Amino acid sequence: QMYNDDGLTANAFEKGKYELLKFESEFKGSTLELDFDAEIGKNYTTTNKQITLVIHNVQKAPKHIKIDKKRTAVHWDVSNNTVTIPITWNAKYELEINIKLKK
């Protein structure tokens, strides 16, 4: 989880001027599923987040990656065994990422 507010409002949480960003991951067979969700305070206006997601210890290039069921291009770095996924996320909506790994 990650807490976010405007950094200026005293007692922002109590005033509903915050967002709590939630991240979960789970392996399902050879697929890594990542879920992004948010709790948004009643007086907070969320904005799009530009996220660079880096996943370590990926030994082979993934078969494919889907963000909200749409295939997307990503960068697999063979020298570091990392996958880099650029994401734009509007926290008003859940986001699901599925990474199909090679066995």
Image (cartoon, rainbow, N blue to C red):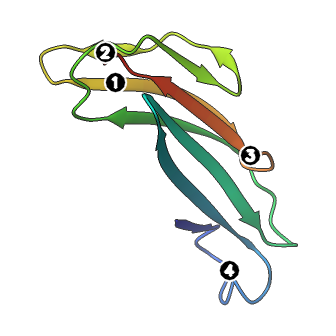
Task: Name the residue beneath numbered marker 2.
Answer: 76
Mark 4 to mark 1 CA distance (whole Å): 37 Å
**What amino acid type is highlighted by mark number 3?**
Glu
Horizontal arrangement in the rendering, residue 20 relative to residue 59 (left or right): right
Task: Name the residue beneath numbered marker 4.
Answer: 9
Task: Quadrant for the C terminus, please.
Answer: top left
Q: Earlier in the sequence, mark 2 or mark 1?
A: 2
Q: Secondary structure at mark 1?
A: strand
Give me the disc on residue 94. 3
**What amino acid type is highlighted by mark number 4?**
Thr
Q: Earlier in the sequence, mark 1 or mark 3?
A: 1
Horizontal arrangement in the rendering, residue 94 relative to residue 65 (left or right): right
Mark 1 to mark 3 CA distance (whole Å): 22 Å
Task: Name the residue beneath numbered marker 1.
Answer: 83
Q: Nearer the viewer, mark 4 or mark 3?
A: 3
Give me the disc on residue 16. none
Mark 2 to mark 4 CA distance (whole Å): 41 Å
Mark 2 Cα within 10 Å, few/some/many (few <14, many 20+)?
Answer: many
